Image: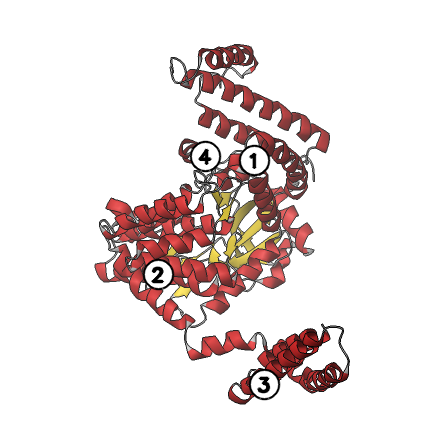
Amino acid sequence: MSRVAAEPAPPGFALLTDTRPPSLARRLVVTVRHVSGLLAGALVARSRAHRGDASEGALKRGIARLGALVAYPLLRRDLRDEPFPVQFRRRLEMLGPTYIKLGQILSLREDILPRPITDELRNLLDRLPVVPYAAFCELVETSVGRPIASMFAEVDEIPLGSASIAQIHRATTVHGDDVVIKAVKPGIRETLSRDAKLLRGVGSVLQLFFSRYQPHKIINEFSDYTLREVDLRREADNCETFQANFADQPDVVFPRVHREFSSQGVLVMEYLEGLRPDSKEAQALPLEDRERLVDLGTGSIIRMIYRDGFFHADLHPGNLVVLAGPKVGYIDLGMVGRLDNDLRRSLLYYFYSLVMGDPDNAARYLASVAEPGRGGDPDGFRREVSEISGRWKRAASFEGFSLAQLTLESVSKGAQYRMYFPVELVLMVKSLITYESVGHMLLPGFDVAEQSRAHIRRVFIAQFSPIKLLEEQLRGAPDLVDAIAKMPSLVTEGVRVLERSTKRPADNPLAGIRGTMLAGFSLVAGAILLAYHGPWPIWAALFLIAFALAARR
């Protein structure tokens, strides 16, 4: 699919008429032009910001002013007088869908990027040009391999939304189910792949000059996340994983996937009919319903992050639905965060320490998940975070000092101390900020700490339940069984080595005595451990191995 026939644009949308993916050479030229323009804009902005600043030497100011004079004529006229954050956002929009998506990811990285830039990047376009209706239907048929009439009785011609990667239409299946059809726009997959190659090259160059901001790491994270998001089968898997995780909570709803109508480039999901939490209708619900919704939202977010380690990473009011009941619905599940066991446990302890008013331990646990860079100062970072966390005890409310904002401020200090965090942590903080802001919309002034405390305590206690501990121990069962199976041969080999060591003449008489004593001690210790820790013969195996090595010396 390249060019599509012209037709009127849907109300509120621009029409995307050329869907051909650009060549790598063309994207290279365009990318270099905009990156060069951005660097020139940075020179001009720096010169203006430091004009008259006596703290810099006259030579530095002169060089900066000369660079700005050379760069100024090279800038686009409509960008010359704009602040640098605005220039950055505008150029990302000009570069197209890949870079708009990159900007949306960068807007989350307040732990690395300056606040003016992340604030401006939140203004990126979120309604991009749409594929015409006829081309959209053709795209669905080609991707699924079935005529659209055999799948849907009706498809709404006006899109529900159009983002950088996909376009969404409401529809009714031939079975009468209300659904949404999400389809990857034509050419996007190829464009993203080519842009990812260019971006990795750009990131390697920027790393040489701006290593403090970790451009190479950020771009690699973005490329990995975005390329996964293009495969809509992953989003279908995410929906079903969330459904399984919350099977015991019917009041937390995720859309059902219609696999028979879906493919790599098309996803058909149940349409959840409800209200946006920031709508006037939702805020006018009875107090009891709003309290129930806030509690459901709090419990589900804490459960996703700290119990399951699998959470919605693109939360905003448009991706939350207030359903009748009341119930809470989550949609647009293409971007998820995953926390491994160690990271999830450390973040659980951090969050628990915060809500229980223990700033020193909160600082210790947060520092433990950061990766110190060159010249990193973990001790200084811990002291800073402890001081910030102490404020939580004095102002634990959204209007005063919110829990999520506290976490974000703590993480933002990482760049100052050369302490860098995994992107999953930043995504987690964004989810917490959304939950707090939505909770405040529905229940102004709600006590974040009190609302969170019961849920986080429940998750915390569950970590140390006998069943949970047994499950963790059973993960090592294959190694344990292997050790038990090898125990007879290890004992036999140990006795043989002991016999040889006592009979073999040694160059140093004391060496034989030492080996015999070590071997004897190992055997005795192994026997004691076997007797009193029957279920854990692996310890005896370790002692026998140590004995064998000692006796051979």
Q: Is residue 118 left or right of residue 356?
A: right
Quarter of the figure with the C terminus: bottom right
Q: Pointer 1: what residue?
A: 99
Looking at the rendered structure, the kind of residue marked 3 is: Val
Q: Pointer 2: what residue?
A: 352
Q: How many residues crowd around disc 1 within 10 Å: few (fewer than 14), some, or many (20 or more)?
A: many
Residue ID at (71%, 33%): 24
Question: Secondary structure under badge 4?
Answer: helix
Q: How many residues crowd around disc 2 within 10 Å: few (fewer than 14), some, or many (20 or more)?
A: many
**In the image, residue 448 lies at what x, y percent?**
28, 55
Q: Pointer 3: what residue?
A: 524
Which comes sooner in the sequence, label 3 or label 2?
A: 2
Residue 23 visible in rendering:
no
Residue ID at (58%, 79%): 539
**In the image, residue 318 lies at what x, y percent?**
41, 48
Q: Between label 3 and label 2, give the one nearer the viewer.
A: 3
> Tell me, what colour scheme is on the image?
secondary structure
Which is nearer the eye, 430 or 48?
A: 48
Which comes sooner in the sequence, label 4 or label 1?
A: 1
Mark 2–mark 1 distance (CA, rounded to whole Å)? 37 Å
Q: Is residue 440 above or below residue 211?
A: below
Residue ID at (68%, 29%): 28
Which is nearer the eye, 153 or 59?
A: 59
Which comes sooner in the sequence, label 2 or label 1?
A: 1
Mark 3–mark 1 distance (CA, rounded to whole Å)? 66 Å
Looking at the rendered structure, the kind of residue marked 4 is: Leu
Q: How many residues crowd around disc 3 within 10 Å: few (fewer than 14), some, or many (20 or more)?
A: some
Q: Between label 3 and label 1, give the one nearer the viewer.
A: 3
Which numbered circle lies on residue 121?
4
